[in-house]
């Protein structure tokens, strides 16, 4: 019988007038994988931030191995063996993998790094050389390094906040195998925080459910709980929409011709001879394992990346030599996969982030009327169901889901003609995913040409009219949606497109 290694009792935490957690009890069994479920804003991340010492509760106590902890801070939590992987990466991009894994004084592989790295890179199927800078890794590879940091810091309790949100189906399956090995062989105690019910059911042994800051279910035995049971506990009945793909298609709004791009660090083609077309009223799905050129292609089309050859044509106008502003003026919107840092500015207020796209337009000017900006933010909050109690608070105080809603609302409220959407629903709960899917379809029906980049094949199959697969910087296969299935798209993603 597993022993309780950590117990939180009667935890209460507020942010201003918002009660994030209300008298929450939570406990973890040694060497067991636990699931923590809840929709956006339910309090999951707040509870984990308390357990890792980042937040302090107003009420309640924490016990480790039966001993009450007076006050946790991140250093003390780490010494007690508690480590957390956050939704937003906390890696030093200019440092190597080895540097990031060995920065902590608690590193247990100081004298035998090679041995430790070989063991865990094998467990996590990570093929990168330890001298590789973090900036050259894919999003999925960065996530693996974040989890490996906990192991190298000798954290026995691993709190993983949405770890599968940036992983492909193949990587997700590999993570499941890896975590079960860590639990069984290394005696790690693991908490998986996720919105994905399938993964909760496949990964975990025990499930806790938060709703509006209240723990509504404790220590449910995973094998005895159904998907519908969990949905009802989280948010009640959910209506999932069916997508009609018989809408009218128009003229070609976006044409990409012979795009070639090389990584300046390696002089290896990241994108090679990429050509595609998207019509008005059409959603083109872009599938691929993380790191095969998706981010680079999106940055080129949106104007962020300028060092490439080939052409980008929007509404018949060649904009290949023009930047972000010119493309926005042609009503092109970009929803990047990195919501905090590229899409939203960390350290800047919610109200300023909401208006940044239109800072230099007369709607807020000529001197940035605060009242007009607040009216605009309130419109976004209402239309996109964003929970943002304090407009002047830093945008990073929002939950991950509410950050994404703010970003998408800002980019889509103007009914753009071309939309590049990269991982638009990553990390969102079922309600938010359905709402944003409906929003994307509404934009399609209004005549937008949409490129949907996603590592969630279910999402691509649901929304796309066509799917192209990117592998090692090349389009290796195109499928009409009626011809696409998990097997043939998955094979193409692995470079096997026979």
Image (cartoon, rainbow, N blue to C red):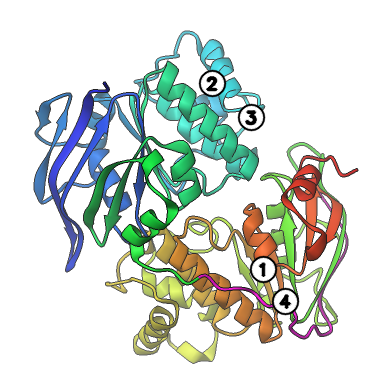
Left/right placement of residue 423 relative to residue 36 reads: right
Task: Tell me the magenta residue range.
Answer: 240-263
- Secondary structure of residue under mark 3: loop
Residues packed near mark 1 inside 10 Å, few (<14), some (14 to 19) or many (20 plus): many
- Name the residue beneath numbered marker 1: 463
Tell me residue 454's x, y (percent).
65, 57
- Secondary structure of residue under mark 4: loop
Between the C-alphas of marks 3 and 2, the distance is 16 Å
> From the image, which quarter does the C terminus lie in?
top right
Between the C-alphas of marks 1 and 3, the distance is 36 Å
Specify which label sits upstream in the sequence, 3 or 2.
2
Q: Nearer the viewer, mark 1 or mark 3?
A: 1
Tell me residue 413's x, y (percent).
54, 82
Left/right placement of residue 243 relative to residue 395 reads: right
Q: Nearer the viewer, mark 3 or mark 2?
A: 2
- Name the residue beneath numbered marker 3: 132
Specify which label sits upstream in the sequence, 4 or 1.
4
Residue at point 82% right, 39% down? 268
- Secondary structure of residue under mark 1: helix
Residue 389 seen in the current view: yes
Specify which label sits upstream in the sequence, 3 or 4.
3
């Amino acid at each position: 019988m597993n022993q309780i290694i950590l117990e939180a009792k009667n935890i209460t935490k507020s942010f201003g007038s918002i009660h994030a957690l209300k008298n929450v009890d939570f406990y973890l069994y040694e060497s067991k994988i636990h699931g923590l479920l809840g929709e956006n804003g339910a309090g999951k991340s707040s509870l984990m931030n308390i357990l890792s010492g980042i937040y302090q509760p107003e009420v309640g106590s924490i016990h480790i191995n039966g001993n009450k902890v007076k006050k946790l801070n991140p250093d003390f939590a780490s010494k007690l063996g508690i480590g957390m992987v956050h939704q937003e990466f906390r890696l030093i991009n200019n440092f190597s993998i080895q540097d990031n894994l060995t920065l902590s004084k608690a590193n247990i592989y100081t004298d035998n790094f090679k041995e430790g790295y070989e063991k865990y890179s094998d467990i996590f199927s990570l093929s990168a050389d330890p001298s590789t800078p973090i900036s050259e890794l894919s999003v999925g590879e960065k996530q693996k390094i974040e989890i490996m940091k906990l192991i190298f810091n000798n954290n026995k309790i691993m709190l993983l906040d949405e770890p599968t949100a940036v992983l492909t189906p193949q990587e997700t399956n590999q993570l499941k195998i890896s975590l079960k090995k860590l639990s069984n062989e290394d005696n790690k105690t693991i908490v998986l925080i996720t919105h994905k019910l399938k993964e909760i059911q496949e990964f975990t042994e025990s499930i806790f459910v938060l709703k509006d800051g209240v723990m509504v279910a404790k220590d449910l035995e995973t094998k005895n709980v159904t998907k519908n049971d969990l949905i009802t506990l989280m948010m009640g009945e959910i209506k999932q929409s069916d997508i009609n793909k018989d809408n009218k298609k128009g003229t070609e709004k976006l044409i990409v011709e012979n795009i070639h791009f090389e990584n300046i660090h390696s002089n290896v083609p990241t994108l090679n001879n990429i050509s595609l077309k998207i019509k008005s009223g059409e959603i083109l799905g872009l599938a691929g394992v993380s790191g095969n050129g998706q981010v680079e292609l999106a940055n080129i089309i949106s104007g962020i990346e300028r060092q490439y050859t080939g052409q980008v044509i929007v509404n018949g106008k060649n904009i290949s030599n023009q930047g972000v502003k010119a493309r926005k003026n042609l009503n092109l919107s970009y929803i990047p996969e990195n919501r905090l840092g590229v899409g939203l500015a960390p350290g800047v207020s919610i109200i300023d982030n909401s208006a940044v796209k239109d800072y230099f337009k007369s709607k807020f000017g000529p001197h940035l009327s605060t009242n007009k900006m607040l009216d605009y933010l309130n419109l976004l909050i209402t239309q996109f169901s964003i929970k943002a109690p304090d407009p002047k608070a830093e945008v990073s105080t929002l939950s991950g889901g509410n950050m994404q809603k703010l970003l998408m609302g800002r980019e889509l409220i103007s009914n753009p003609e071309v939309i590049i959407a990269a991982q638009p629903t990553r990390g969102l709960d079922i309600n938010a995913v359905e709402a944003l899917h409906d929003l994307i379809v509404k934009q399609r029906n209004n005549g937008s040409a949409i490129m949907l980049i996603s590592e969630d094949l279910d999402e691509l199959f649901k929304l796309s009219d066509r799917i192209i697969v990117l592998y090692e910087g090349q389009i290796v296969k195109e499928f009409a949606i009626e011809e696409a299935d998990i097997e043939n798209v998955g094979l193409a993603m692995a470079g096997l497109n026979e």
